[in-house]
Image (spheres, grey):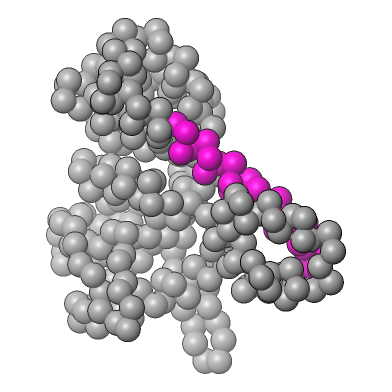
Amino acid sequence: MQKYDVALKNLLTRGASGFLSRLMGLEVAKFLNVNLPEARTHQPDLLGEARDSTLFHVELQSTNDARMAFRMLDYLVAIELKCMRLPRQLVLYVGEAPMRMKNRIAAGGLSFEVKMVDIRELDGKDLLESDSLDDNILSILARQPDGRRAVRSILEKIAASGPANRAQALQELTLLAGLRSLGGFIKEESQNMPILTDIMDHDLYGPMIRQGMAAGRIEGRVEGERALFQKLVSKRFGTPPDWVNQRIVQLEVEELEDLYLRLLDARSLDELFGAA
């Protein structure tokens, strides 16, 4: 997720604060770059302040985390201790698999709820038609009836932008498009635009953009492998507890391959994950 964090943070803070304003119902004034003190360091993805002085906190999530609500409550307390104010919070989900995270905690007298938005629930048309190139790039993650057409439109806007912006914009688009398996469309469509083909073939920018495409494909594949493994575990042992779901969303490809084999013989969840 770290690769996507960088691109998404850049897009959301550089020129797309209007997107967050609409999403959160706040007029963004500034972003705060702080580490939150505790026994461990908290690093919120986005912490900012609205023009009415409301504090807001946004976490960007590309995988389903069974304990996301608890993480947000942890952040809430840490932010209040640091800033002496409670923030308005949002989890913005950008993953490929359907969002399955619970947004509410209700146990032992505790009641906590956080707003969670799957970016695919948002109509990508408004973002695609925006005058902001950052909004246009973000639209690739939102609901799009025709992914290829959206890619073509964004590439045309990138080609028409200033020379200083094109390479970075194309790199960010290819990286995020990997979350929607649209990297191949970008390569095909950009070949029809000589100005973008030059960037793709550039000694410096070309490898960076191709790396972004590869990262997106890998992340999409890993997310799919995790979802399939979770289904197999449920089939074998019944609905898994939270600690198992938490382990699964953190697994990498090599660990998944090993666990697929162990699943055949494991007699319990403890045995399956004991040495993982």
Q: Is residue 111 above or below residue 98?
A: below
Residue 202 appears left or right of 70: left
* Residue 225 position within the rendered picture, expressed as x and y whole percent measured from the top left: 65, 48
Residue 23 appears left or right of 228: left
Could you tell me if residue 15 is visible in this image?
A: yes
Could you tell me if residue 143 is visible in this image?
A: no
Residue, x 53% and y 78% (percent of image)? 105
Membership of 235 in magenta stretch: yes
Q: Main secondary structure of the magenta part?
A: helix
* Residue 222 position within the rendered picture, expressed as x and y whole percent measured from the top left: 58, 46
Residue, x 49% and y 68% (percent of image)? 68
Task: Give the quarter of the image for residue 186.
Answer: top left
Q: Is residue 275 above or below residue 133?
A: below
**Nearer to me, 69 or 262:** 262
Task: Give the quarter of the image for residue 187.
Answer: top left
Q: What segment carries the magenta color?
A: 213-239
Membership of 105 in magenta stretch: no
**Nearer to me, 219 or 207:** 207
Residue, x 28% and y 30% (percent of image)? 169
Q: Is residue 156 above or below residue 2?
A: above
Residue 231 appears left or right of 249: right
